[in-house]
Image (cartoon, rainbow, N blue to C red):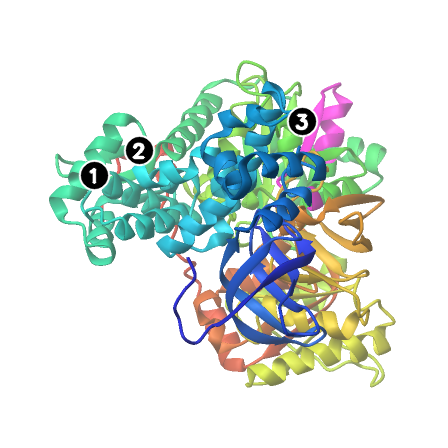
Amino acid sequence: MLTDDYHLTIIEGYLENISYFNEETHYTVAKIRTPGIDNPVTVVGFMAAVSPGETLKIAGSWETHPKYGEQLRIKTFEVTLPATVEGIKKYLGSGIIKGIGPSAASKMVDCFGPLTLEIIEKHPERLFEVSGIGKAKAASITEAWQNHHLVRSLMNFLQDMGVKTSFSGKILKLYGENAVKILTDNPYRVANDIPGAGFYIADVIARKLGLSHDKPERIRACILHLLEQGTNDGHVFLYGNKIIEKCKDIFEIEYDSVLDGMDYLSESGEIFIEKNSEHFENCEVYLKELYLAEKGIADRLLSYLSVPLAGISLHSDDITQKIQKKLAIKLSQEQINVIKGVFSHRVAIITGGPGTGKTTLIRSVAAIFESFGNKIELAAPTGRAARRLAEVTGRKAQTIHRLLGYNAIDRFFDKDQDNPIEADAVIIDEASMVDTLLMYSLIRAVSLSSVLILVGDIFQLPSVGPGNVLSDLITCEKIPVFYLSKIYRQADESPIIINAHRVRHGEFPVFKEPDDPGSISEFYFIEQNKSERIASLILELCEKTIPRFCGCNPVEDIQVLAPMHKGVAGTIYLNQVLQKILNPNSAFIEAAGSRFKEGDKVMHLRNNYQKEVFNGDIGFIDSIDEKKKELLVHYYDRAVSYDFEELDELSPAYAISVHKSQGSEYPVVIIPLVTEHYMLLQRNLLYTAITRGTKIVILIGSKKALNIALKNDKPRERLSGLKNRLNGIKPTSL
């Protein structure tokens, strides 16, 4: 139904052509030919199951595109079906409905006249009355008609309910032809099936349908929604009293109803509740999957610690000789002591900051294992981290998912306790990035007869996913931890590494002017309090200053790392303005809320094992073929093809979040620091950003923002019970 909002413009005309259509979201760019207007009107927005030749009535608001001029942003739309015999014959004969051509259309209209469309939709069994249409063809026409109108009816339903029609593609893929019936009968089903937005979709529909706000299905969906939100914030569980408070304050659900909902979900196995008393508020509430993962990690690690290791007896001289022979390097006494300790334990952790020799330790441990004829596996959480690990060690390294034999179609790991990884030792680098679910999958696939070594920097940001696994394992004091503290000579001369360690300790960085006026310092600070001016300075640095002094490629070698996505100093805006400056190509396509040009630097946003591209991989757009609706991205040594409907897996990468940079290194790093980002101005975030740079690191912003980050050494608390489980401590409530 069209809206009656008087602020909107309503046009009616026939659909001349579709310039762009995203099959996933149904985002459409099209031309509408309207009576009395010489040129067609460009309309943009969400439409589905429309074809050239159909008559549309569209309500929308005018906006001006910098390149394409005036266009109408679609708010709602209707398809106006023809009512006259000639109109119906022309409509069906256009090929809109698969299986009906001009000849069949003419015969159908001759048979049924103005009732033709009603017969197809409501009485398809009468199609046999048309000469030349048998049982098979009638069934084919009926199916094609239903498919053509299915998405349209769903979008109309969502419009009537006040739900964004961009969700129609996902809903249709989930529920097929029964989508509207399912949403009407039980709207809260979508809350479970579409993470995040599903609860709000369900709640809007339920309220529109007049369903009670304390309906049991709503209460249960609300509890699960809050737990999912907690997971997105990094928590493994939520306290029962906090769930009760939020249910009442945000969703107007009373105390007893929440307890009934938690009781039901617990009995059905969807959540797990650990209680200190009979009262639900004094408890830790887990989604079942996270409970099993956290408990599984603790149980498996305690099993490791209980299995004696037939230790390899190593003396300092043995280590020195083996490493000098294998790697031609001389280890420090600290490194020798760590290696001796690692070879005395079934599971061990090596941690240290930049320049302390973690990579050297990995190479050395691997070399010694191999000297005894042992098989080792090296892995890291992301593709880029695994690739860097392979480069610096000169050995094969892979993602943890690949090591575990991830099956992308069935979404399970081939390796587990019954089919363990075939290795005498498994070494995991960048372990701070491993979340609770992935660590559980990894740890149960490592045989109890193998050695597991986790290597990481505890001071970096925690994993994107739930939990704070490496920190919990280190602070539980159950697992042997070996600290690297000595900064080696070459690193000791680097102002980046020196200042990274100063930041780690909460000390103000040391900024030194370059000795040569014609050069740039390796680590410096540009003080600027205005966010708009910061964005301008970043553009100037990327386009002119750094390339002029360093001779580097501004697109390939410079990486802007921002604490947040929003605001003038956030990734969204910076990507838009950097793209304009660094990529002057005028041709572009728009998809998934971004603009893409040939030559753009882009980041892949989620693991795609069919394409062998992983979350955080950065590549460059080689070509865009609008006829084939295909985009080609070059990653490292190969090109990967994307259909236009897959472009939600890509994002411009001139500026990225600090979280997305973990596991990567860049020649030049620019870090904007503004007080507007105070929610994320933390010491570990700044430390992580600084340690991504190898040659030049530039901080740009206010000293106040820098001081906020340095003083904020209390990262956002993550609720996790792993440390207590390892120490045998019962859950405690807030």
Q: Which mark is residue 216?
A: 1
Vertical position of residue 75 compared to residue 469: above or below: below
**Crowd band around label 1 with a 10 angstrom C-alpha radius: few (<14), some (14–19), many (20+):** some
| Residue at (12% x, 43% y) in the render | 256
Vertical position of residue 659 compared to residue 96: above or below: below
Q: Measure the alpha-carbon separation of dots 2 and 3.
A: 48 Å
Q: x and y percent of residue 280 in the render?
A: 17, 39
Location of mark 3 (residue): 314
Q: Earlier in the sequence, mark 1 or mark 3?
A: 1
Q: x and y percent of residue 487 in the render?
A: 67, 56
Q: Magenta segment range?
A: 364-384
Q: x and y percent of residue 540 in the render?
A: 74, 81
Quadrant location of the N terminus in the rendered image? bottom left
Left-right relation of 229 to 533: left
Q: Nearer the viewer, mark 2 or mark 3?
A: 2
Disc 1 is placed on an element classified as helix
Location of mark 2 (residue): 271
Residue 234 in sight: no
Q: Measure the alpha-carbon separation of dots 2 and 1.
A: 16 Å
Q: Is residue 625 magenta?
A: no
- Amino acid type, residue under disc 2 in the picture: Ile
